[in-house]
Amino acid sequence: MIQFENPLGTIEIDEKYFSELLGNIVPTCFGVVGMADLNVFQSVRSFFDRKHQFPDQGVSVRSEPGGLVIELHIIVTYGLNIETVVRNIVEKVRYTTEDVTGMPVKNVRVYVDEMRS
């Protein structure tokens, strides 16, 4: 559970909400083929159920003093400028998260795990 204090009280949002929100947003960004597995659990789940793309795949969100820290593991299209793709993702994730939840984003870390044509 991620908690955020504001003048009106405390907001509590489940990590799964953030994972599903970002897991549905990031694949729509230019140059992103899909999301890579974040950990062993996701790898095993993907291995046994290859038909589905899980919304929390490749997304990790945690709360730290000063805001949220978001980690994304992505697969990009081969031949594109990776810096441009990552910058686009960071801006879109930061804007969407702050707009939807009202919680500040401290850092967005994007890891390019694979490239596909």
Image: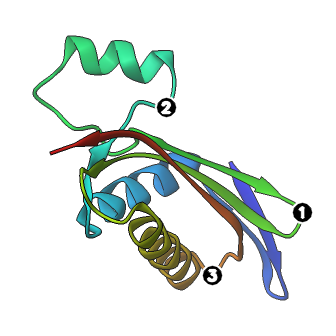
- Helix, strand or loop for disc 2: loop
Q: Which residue is depicted at the point 51% across and 56% down? A: 18
Kind of residue at badge 2:
Leu
Instruction: Calculate the distance from the C-alpha at mark 1 to the C-alpha at mark 2.
Output: 23 Å
Q: Residues within 10 Å of mark 1 (few under 14, many from 20)?
A: few
Name the front one of labels 3 and 1. 1
Given residues 114 and 92, the one toward you in this image is 114
Residue 10 x %, y %: 78, 70
| Location of residue 12 (image quadrant) | bottom right
Mark seen at residue 65: 1
- Helix, strand or loop for disc 3: loop
Kind of residue at badge 1:
Pro
Residue 75 x %, y %: 33, 45
Kind of residue at badge 3:
Gly
Residue 77 x %, y %: 23, 53
Mark seen at residue 102: 3
